[in-house]
């Protein structure tokens, strides 16, 4: 059992973490045992190293920490009903973390169940977790942008090289005609 001073210190630490997190995902961990939660944490570590954490947190502590971090907790009070575990990402791709926990939930037949999430300060309901898990990762988006920029440049290079080839063929034809 935590003392009041320890709870206050935990609230202070968590509020700083939440201020710096790009993702705060709320879930109900009921039905998961310690080995399964450890497995989920291992999968998160494989993808995001130490950038993401999945913690079981008392509702009152989470509520106060979010409030202190500047989130509007009154609009999400139903999140604090029942057991609460929070996945937060301080460093790394938040979409990758959503994919990991969503795939884990599918594998475990809906456990943990989602209550909602904050992604870059915007709240999304639990129903939107699946849609967010289908988004491309940051690296995939960057690759799409690069290929989109690269396409017109490649086309220009091909057009210019085609013009030069045509000129070369014409000059070769003139040379062959004069050599005859």
Image (cartoon, rainbow, N blue to C red):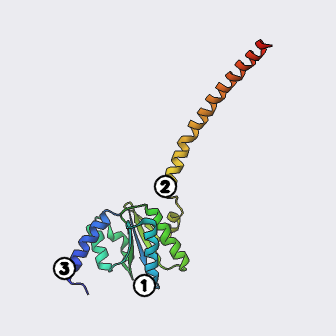
Picture disc at residue 5: 3
Point 46% across, 62% down: residue? 95
Q: Is residue 71 visible?
A: no
Of label 2 and label 1, which has the lower sequence position? Answer: 1
Determine the residue positioned at 45% across, 86% down.
33
Per the model, the C-alpha gap separating discs 3 and 2 is 43 Å
Q: How dense is the environment of label 1, judged by Cα within 10 Å: few (below 14), some, or many (20 and up)?
A: few
Pair 1/3: label in front: 1
Q: Position of residue 1 (x, y in %)?
A: 26, 87
**Residue located at (25% from left, 75% from top):** 10
SS of the residue at dot 3? helix
The residue sitting at 52% across, 78% down in the picture is 110
* Observer-nearest of 19 and 144: 144
Tag 1 secondary structure: helix
Mark 3 crowdedness (10 Å alpha carbons): few <14, some 14-19, many ≥20: few
Position in image of residue 38 (x %, y %): 43, 79
Mark 2 sits on what residue? 139
Front residue of 66/19: it is 19
The answer to whether one can see residue 7 in this image is: yes
- Sequence-first tag of 1 and 3: 3
Q: Eyeballing the image, is 180 above or below 7?
A: above
Of helix, strand and loop, which one carries label 2? Answer: helix
Q: Position of residue 170 (x, y in %)?
A: 72, 20
Kindly identify which residue carries mark 1.
34
In the image, farthest residue toward the front: 179
Picture coordinates of residue 80, whole percent (x, y):
36, 77
**Is mark 1 in CB contact (under 8 Å) with mark 3?**
no
Quadrant for residue 34, please give it: bottom left
Residue 112 image label: none
Nearest to the observer: residue 165 or residue 34 = 165
C-alpha span from label 2 to label 1: 32 Å
Q: Is residue 5 above or below residue 142?
A: below
């Amino acid at each position: 059992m935590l003392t009041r001073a320890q709870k206050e210190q935990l609230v202070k630490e968590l509020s700083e973490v939440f201020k710096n997190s790009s993702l705060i995902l709320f879930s109900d961990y009921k039905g998961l045992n310690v080995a399964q939660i450890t497995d989920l944490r291992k999968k998160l570590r494989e993808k995001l190293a130490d950038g993401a954490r999945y913690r079981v947190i008392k509702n009152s502590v989470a509520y106060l920490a979010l409030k202190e971090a500047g989130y509007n907790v009154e609009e999400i009070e139903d999140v604090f009903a029942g057991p609460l575990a929070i996945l937060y990402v301080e460093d790394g791709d938040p979409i990758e973390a959503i994919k990991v926990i969503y795939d884990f939930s599918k594998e475990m037949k809906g456990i943990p169940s989602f209550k909602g999430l904050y992604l870059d300060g915007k709240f999304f309901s639990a129903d939107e977790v699946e849609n967010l898990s289908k988004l491309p990762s940051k690296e995939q988006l960057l690759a799409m942008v690069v290929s989109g920029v690269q396409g017109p440049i490649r086309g220009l290079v091909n057009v210019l090289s085609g013009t030069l080839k045509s000129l070369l063929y014409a000059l070769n034809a003139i040379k062959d005609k004069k050599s005859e």
